[in-house]
Image (cartoon, rainbow, N blue to C red):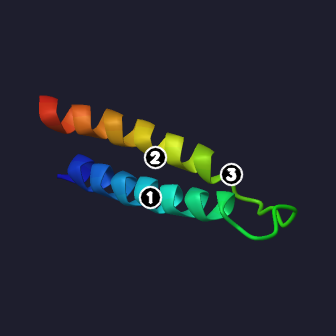
């Protein structure tokens, strides 16, 4: 059950990070960079989702 919760949370984080990365690329001031690399956050969340999803399906 906790792995399924982890997979769900990772999915939510991945979708949120994808939305923020999309907004970051379309901002009006390209010099106003943020401190969070949303692409890296999204990749880490997708890797966590893949591992947790695999573990849930194997159990």
Q: Is residue 33 above or below residue 28?
A: above
Q: Position of residue 58 (x, y in %)?
A: 14, 29
For the image, the number of numbered tags is 3
Instruction: Tell me which residue sits at (33%, 35%) in the image.
Output: 50
Task: Provide residue 9's location: percent of width, then percent of height.
Answer: 35, 58
Proximity of marks 3 and 1: CB atoms separated by less than 8 Å: no
Badge 3 is on which residue? 37
Q: Are marks 1 and 2 in contact (CB under 8 Å)?
A: yes
Left/right of residue 47 with respect to residue 7 in the rendered view: right
- Residue 34: x and y in percent read 77, 63
Residue that numbered label 1 is attached to? 13
CA–CA distance in space, label 2 to label 3:
13 Å
For disc 2, the marked residue is 45
Residue found at the far right of this picture: 31
Above or below: residue 7 compared with residue 36: above
* Quarter the C terminus occupies: top left
Snapshot quadrant of residue 53: top left
């Amino acid at each position: 059950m906790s792995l399924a919760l982890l997979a769900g949370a990772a999915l939510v984080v991945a979708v949120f990070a994808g939305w923020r990365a999309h907004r970051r690329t379309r901002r009006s001031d390209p010099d106003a960079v943020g401190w969070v690399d949303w692409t890296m956050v999204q990749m880490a969340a997708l890797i966590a989702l893949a591992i947790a999803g695999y573990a849930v399906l194997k159990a």
